[in-house]
Image (tube, grey):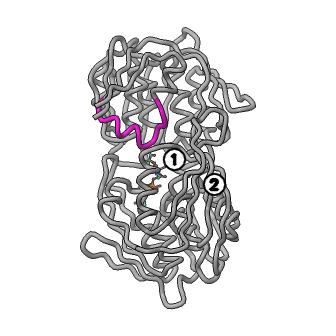
Amino acid sequence: MDRIRIRGGNRLNGTIAISGAKNAALPLMAASLLTEDTLKLENVPHLADISTMAALLAHHGVKIGLEGDAPNGGHRGRVMSFNAQTITDTEAPYDLVRKMRASVLVLGPLVARIGEARVSMPGGCAIGNRPIDLHLKGLEALGAEIELAEGYIAARAPKGGLKGGHIVFPFASVGATENLLMAACLADGETVISNAAREPEITDLAHCLMAMGADISGVGTDTLTVRGQKTLHGATHPIIPDRIETATYVMAVGIAGGEVELTNTRVDFLKSALEKLTESGLKITPTVKGMKVSRGQHRLKGVDVMTEPFPGFPTDLQAQMMALMSTANGASMITETIFENRFMHVPELSRMGANITVHGASAMVRGVKSLTGAQVMATDLRASVSLVLAGLAAEGETVLHRVYHLDRGYERLEEKLAACGADIERLKG
Ligand code: EPZ
């Protein structure tokens, strides 16, 4: 299994091109199931999760083409086409769903277009229990019948297909909003989704669905109104830049120091995170292509952070923020409100010399002057990258194990950091 070795202490200087957003790409790929025509996606990141979703779609009968594979440097990333003219299988098997929970995003599109689907129940995962009850209740509100048996969800639309309805989520869920938004596009009549999540990836999905002929209003708000269509058609859609990857590199500059321009990205997706990072002492200036980030010789100062649904501080940046705060001047209280078990990085950061105490959903981080390199591993994507950030600042050598977590969500991470002067390399095998 690959590992990543980092020798800490180098400042970062240069340019990093940001890839397309993984969490936008996955639902967009699932949306290809809604039409017989070809959906072409541009700026698709080259990641393990994208391959898993492609394998699942291919299993359903989707024909997938790769129409461009340039490295991401000021261009539009990979271009992939998806044609779901013939759905040959409506089952999402356990082996694919257990690899990636986002596989459940095929449920809404399949039931809406074909009238049925059988999807393996995703189990719990490293960051929490993560039930999918809101996805299922939402489908029931559109008339679907749901049965749970043998670890599978069997969903069936009524005769004549799904019917528009009013879905009121008790709290915002990214995946449930996406699943129901896609399903509602082919339901008969109007669907209102109240308390919808508002993440930029959902807005991106809505824009693509509208390019495919969907009639959606309220995009970007917590109330989405969808007037169902009989069919959708093909479209070409560029995927938005990855805001989590962007902020991860902002924090890499924060922890290592230096000056880096992040290109192919947008500041408006990251308002609350960038505000916090500026408050802690990072200089962030918007540029034509994205933003420039710099930190001089001074230490950052500790700031408090609480994760919230968009537009609040993202849970997907909590682990990275904790790494950053572990070398800040002063204390920082980091509170996780989205997932109940998303502090798995704490013991690993502590092994590198961080001073962190967890009380329930909050972690008190008392900044230390320096971290020390160690052998570390993590159980999920963002926790893994937080250890890379810590390694950039640590004295000596850090070796990160279980790199497959990183490969799910960061495209060519070690290349991008090495090009800015980090001493980082992948050890194969
Ligand atoms: C999406 O997961 C992201 N994944 C996650 O990215 C991200 O952490 C999360 O949103 C929150 O922003 C993708 O977009 C593919 P949720 P999702 O439904 O949709 C509870 C990463 O590192 N809930 O918004 O699964 C749930 O347990 C990751 O890239 C229910 O109780 O998240 C959680 O506590 C990992 N019942 C909360 O809601 C449901 O039916 C928010 O989850 C659904 C969710």
Is residue 214 positioned above or below 16 on the image? below
Would the CB of label 1 be found within 8 Å of ligand 1?
A: yes
Measuring from the top left, give residue 198's x and y in whole percent. 59, 55
* Numbered mark located on residue 22 in the image: 1
**Rendering quadrant holding ligand 1:** bottom left
Q: Residue at x 31, y 47 (%)?
A: 126
Circle 2 crowding by C-alpha within 10 Å: few under 14, some 14–19, many from 20 = many
Circle 1 crowding by C-alpha within 10 Å: few under 14, some 14–19, many from 20 = many
User: How many numbered discs sit on the rendered protein?
Assistant: 2
Residue 411 in magenta stretch: yes
Q: Nearer the viewer, residue 238 or 223?
A: 238
Is residue 421 positioned above or below 119 on the image? above
Q: Which of disc 2 and disc 1 is earlier in sequence?
A: 1
What residue does disc 2 label? 204
Along the horizontal axis of the image, is 227 left or right of 317?
right
Along the horizontal axis of the image, is 4 left or right of 174?
left
Q: Amino acid at mark 1?
A: Lys
Pick the quarter of the image with the C terminus: top left
Asked whether the viewer can see residue 357, the reply is no
Residue 121 in magenta stretch: no
* Numbered mark located on residue 292 in the image: none
- Distance from the alpha carbon under mark 1 to that under mark 2: 12 Å
Pick the quarter of the image with the N terminus: top left
Is residue 413 positioned above or below 198 on the image? above
- Where are the magenta residues, as a range? 401-413
